Structures are given as C-alpha cells and as structure tokens.
Image: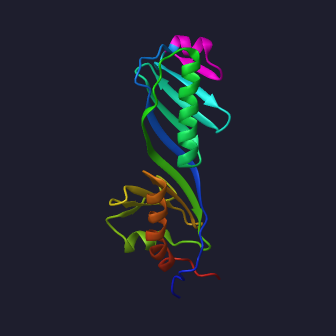
Amino acid sequence: MEPSNDVALDIIITNVVSVFRTRCHLNLHTIGLEGSNVIYKPEMGKVLMKLRKPRITASIWSSGKIICTGATSEEEAKLGARRLARCLQKIGFKVRFSDFKVVNVLAVCSLPFQIRLIEFTKNNRPIASYEPEIHPAASYRIKNLRSTVQVFSTGSITVTGPNVQSVASAVEQIYPLLFECQKTRS
C-alpha cells in the first residue's frame, strides 16, 4: 500500500504562544487594582490578565515583557496582544507595542489508522524515542523545523513547533513514516 497524496488531514491548532514588549516599566499593583479580569500574583512577580475575545491569557511582568497563551491562530495571537496593549494604555501606562513574536504553536491531528509504535521507533532510531513506562507516546524530533511530534498508538499526533508553517511541514514529513507502520485491521 502506498501513501496516497490526496489524503487530507485536519490539523487543529490548539494553542499559540506569543511574546511582546511594552517598552515601558509596568506597576503590577496598579494593574491589579485598576485592570479588569486580572489576578495579581506578587509572590511570582507577575499579573495574569484574561481577555474574552479572543480568548487569551497573558502573563505580565513589571519589566514590560508580556507572554500571551491560548490563541488558536497567529493572527488571533497578534490581535489579542494588541488588545492587551490597549488595555494597559487605558489604565495609564505609556505602552508601545513592539517586538511581537510567535514563539510556540501546539497542534493536534488524527490519522485515519492506528500505529505500531515499537516498529516506528525501531525504523527511525536516533530521531524517534519511545519509553512506554514514562509516556504513552513516541517522540519524534525534527531538528531542521525545530518541531517535536508526539505519536500515539491510536493514530493521534501532537505537534509542537515555532510557527504554523513548521507544524504543517512536520505533519507532511512524518506522515509517510507513520503510514509504513500502520496497524493492519483484523
């Protein structure tokens, strides 16, 4: 059986992590008192701020560095980051939106077949590793894309990479390897 080129896999992006700077010092106590949907964590030295649309959670540090998690696309991450900067401006800080960067993308994909993990790991030795006592998935690292693929025996895969393009490329690259190791239906 050959892997057919017309197989369409749905890659669902579940989380996009981005970071940006405000280029000004932020008083966390003021944000905690005057901001909406905030949780002030003085023991960690940060404030958590949540947005409803797009659904994003941001970790805000006094240095002006902000990490946003929870977006489902790169565009949504940028829109959410800009909305956070606007919220901080309304509180009274001289925020300038700068150095925006998507740092991590997490996606899931379901294959139409199950996988023999031991055979997959043996075929792709130094790159793939499988420790069933530690984790139920086999790990496959793609260095040139800076991506990691977690392969489960059910045919479900989780892909982590620096951007959406590298995640899609990782799925394209690993699909033929997984197709060789599919379980036969009995």
Q: Quadrant of residue 120?
A: bottom left
Look at 57% across and 57% down and name the residue there. Answer: 108
Residue 132 visible, this orientation: no
**How far across and how far down the image is residue 114, in percent?**
58, 72
Residue 163 visible, this orientation: yes
User: In the displayed structure, would residue 134 be above or below residue 127?
Assistant: above
User: In the displayed structure, would residue 21 be above or below residue 39?
Assistant: below
Quadrant assignment for the C terminus: bottom right
What segment carries the magenta color? 29-42
Look at 68% across and 34% down and name the residue there. Answer: 52
Q: Residue furthest bottom?
A: 1
Residue situated in front as seen by the camera: 60 or 177 = 60
**How far across and how far down the image is residue 4, in percent?**
54, 83
Residue situated in front as seen by the camera: 101 or 39 = 101
User: In the displayed structure, would residue 96 be above or below residue 140?
Assistant: above
**How far across and how far down the image is residue 67, in percent?**
48, 33
**How far across and how far down the image is residue 121, in percent?**
41, 68
Look at 58% across and 16% down and name the residue there. Answer: 91
Residue situated in front as seen by the camera: 120 or 32 = 32
Q: Is residue 38 magenta?
A: yes
What is the count of numbered marks?
A: 0
Look at 49% across and 77% down and name the residue there. Answer: 181
The answer to whether 72 appears left or right of 103 in the picture is right
